[in-house]
Image: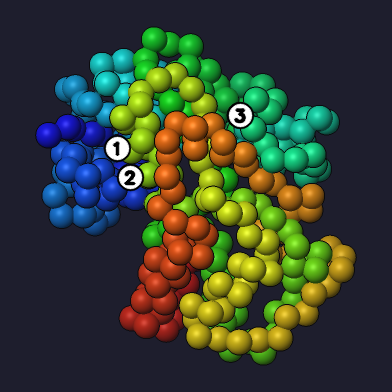
Amino acid sequence: MRSALVIGGTGTIGGAVARHLLRDGWRVTVTGRTPRPVPDGVTLTLADHDSLPTGEFDLVVDAACYTAAHARQVLPLMRAAGSAVMISSKAVYTDADGNHVNSPEPPRFTGPVTEAQPTMAPGDMPYDSPLGYGANKVAAEHLLLDSAAPVTVLRPSKVHGIGARPPREWWFLSKCLERQPYIKLAGNGLGVDHPSAAANIAALVARVADRPGRRILNAADPDAPNGLTISRVVAARAGHTWEEILLPGDDEEGRHPWHRIPPIILDTTAAEELGYQPAGDYAGTVAEELDWMLGEVRRDPRWSPG
């Protein structure tokens, strides 16, 4: 039985990876800083990068690597592993003017973003800041990819899945639960910011485990629905209908989490050429996140993701 260590395995991405590997017959150990529930059969170790487990694993996945310091701490485990994965982010990419998704001026990409797109310069400022998030991810990527470890860096986009923080679909779902009779959508609802299902990221991790190597792969859903499509997917799951008011401009009331014009779409050709097969499209994979939130509301009508 192959063994896997998933660092940050109590989070949305790490949890999906653990569940996928468990179904594939792996022996799975996850780390987390708080004792959140994990699937039956998964070993939970309360730990962070300062207290990682010892030993050797066939696969090491770091879903909580935010800085070069984190990368340095996990590197010995990755060097000893048969395959390793670092979860990065599309936030590292910059357009021709150096703008990124967290900069004051939004990026304007001229087409689907490949792994060859320029990135931010590496940095070590606070990683939970708009400028620091992507810069620290780049620094961590460089440290791992420059090592001899068999590390694949995955760059997802807007992640959705059970336990997502924040669950962006709540923007629409909360309005459905309030039985709002209409929904306003800026940009005629055509804004696109490519979603990435945690289940699809997990499927790509599983493929990388079988095809180890040092590389960078975009990790996104096979489709990139616009805001109008996403609003309809959420409303249908909630059993709600509403009038769609399409606003041609950048109206603040109609700005939803996927309102990006021009769109941000990740090119996933490299992952597909590796033999990756997604778990499903956006509508199919987002259902579990929506059902999770609907279940929480049924248990406590006052629930919200905060």
User: In the rendered structure, which disc, 3 or 2, sits on the residue that comes first in sequence?
Assistant: 2
- Tag 3–tag 2 contact (CB < 8 Å): no
- Tag 2–tag 1 contact (CB < 8 Å): yes
Residue 102: horizontal and vertical position, in percent?
69, 42
Q: Nearer the viewer, residue 24 or 247?
A: 24
How busy is the neighbourhood of tag 3: few (under 14 within 10 Å), some, or many (20 plus)? some
Instruction: Locate the N terminus by quadrant.
Output: top left
Against 79, residue 134 (above or below) is below
Rounded to the nearest angstrom, the CA distance separating label 2 from label 1 is 8 Å
Left or right: 249 as drawn, with respect to 295 = right
Q: Looking at the image, is mark 2 or mark 1 nearer the viewer? A: 2
Q: Looking at the image, is mark 3 or mark 2 nearer the viewer? A: 3
Residue 5: horizontal and vertical position, in percent?
25, 34
Query: Any mark on residue 269, and which?
Result: none
Q: Looking at the image, is mark 1 or mark 3 nearer the viewer? A: 3
User: In the rendered structure, which disc, 1 or 3, sits on the residue that comes first in sequence?
Assistant: 1
Query: Any mark on residue 6, and which?
Result: 1
